[in-house]
Amino acid sequence: MLCNPMVYKQKGGATMVRTQVYLTENQRNELARIAQALGKKQSEIIREGIDLVIERSRRNSKENALREAVGMWKDRNDLPDFEKIRKEWDRF
């Protein structure tokens, strides 16, 4: 069985894949400063930043889906009277 040379390490059950990223000089300097201040490796800070971007993207996708769904039943006349149903439930 051949092994992908870029997959090199397991951390907490997650496979780590080596990659290369180009940073501006300012980004590199700020990253080094932040890593030193937090006592973390630069690679750890980069992974945390990527996780934040992924989470924001997922959150935005969910919010967009909800926005698109608003009012999707407004023109339907084949649905039950939900106000009447809710009032019946409130009696109990």
Image: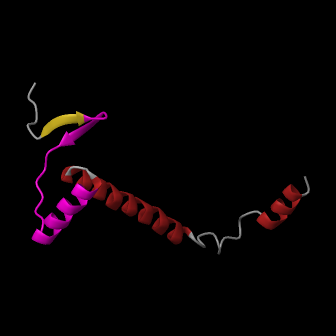
Q: In this view of the protein, can residue 81 be seen by the observer?
A: no
Q: Can you name the residue that lies furthest to the right here?
A: 91
Q: In this view of the protein, can residue 67 be seen by the observer?
A: yes
Q: Position of residue 85 (x, y in %)?
A: 82, 60
Q: In which quarter of the image is the N terminus?
A: top left
Q: Which of 65 and 8 is in front in this view?
A: 8
Q: Is residue 50 on the magenta stretch?
A: no
Residue that appears at 24% across and 37% down: 15
Residue that appears at 20% across and 66% down: 30
Q: Where is residue 31 in the image (x, y as percent from the top left)?
A: 20, 62
Q: Nearer the viewer, residue 9 or 77?
A: 9
Residue that appears at 25% across and 55% down: 45
Q: Give the quarter of the image for residue 34.
A: bottom left
Q: Is residue 58 left or right of residue 19?
A: right
Q: Is residue 34 left or right of residue 91?
A: left
Q: Give the quarter of the image for residue 3.
A: top left
Where are the magenta residues, as a range?
11-37
Q: Is residue 32 on the magenta stretch?
A: yes
Q: Can you name the residue that lies furthest to the top here?
A: 1
